[in-house]
Amino acid sequence: MKSGARTKDKRTPVATAIGKRIKICRVEAELTQEQLAHEALIDRSYVSAIERGVGNPSIETLANLCYVMGITLSKLFEPLDISLKPTGDRRASPGGK
């Protein structure tokens, strides 16, 4: 890749919506990104990436973030009204045929 070339934007509508929701909940909990990251045992730059819709956190990471913010996963997802048509190749289960 040439230097200065732009990389493909990997944000999806779901990641963007979750990131915005994480930021809203973090601010409501009166936490900085640094405080949230420290308590959730992740790096602050990853919290930033999640909030920008660039990071793709696991459900476990989301649960950890929710715990620190004093909310449940259902509370995090409650206002989100998003579904996406599946795209790409079929995913097989590990060890599946």
Image (cartoon, helix red, strand yellow):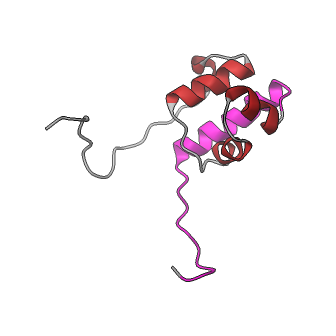
Q: Position of residue 72 (x, y in %)?
A: 62, 16
Q: Quadrant of residue 18?
A: top right
Q: Residue furthest bottom?
A: 2
In this image, 89 relative to 65: left or right? Answer: left
The percent position of residue 22, horizontal first and vertical second, equals 68, 33
Give yes or no for residue 21 being in the magenta stretch. yes
What residue do we see at 26% from left, 51% from top?
89
Percent coordinates x, y for residue 82 in the rendering = 50, 36
- 30 lies left or right of 61: right
Which of 94/87 is in front? Answer: 94
Q: Residue furthest left?
A: 97
Rendering quarter of residue 84: top left
Query: Which quarter of the rendered picture does the C terminus lie within?
Result: top left
For image coordinates 25% across by 35% down, the residue present is 94
- In the image, 7 versus 20, the foreground residue is 7
Q: Residue at x 24, y 45 (%)?
A: 90
90 left or right of 83 in image: left
Residue 67 at x, y = what percent?
67, 18
Q: Which residues are magenta?
A: 2-31
Vertical order, 72 against 50 (above or below): above
Up/down of 12 relative to 64, above or below? below
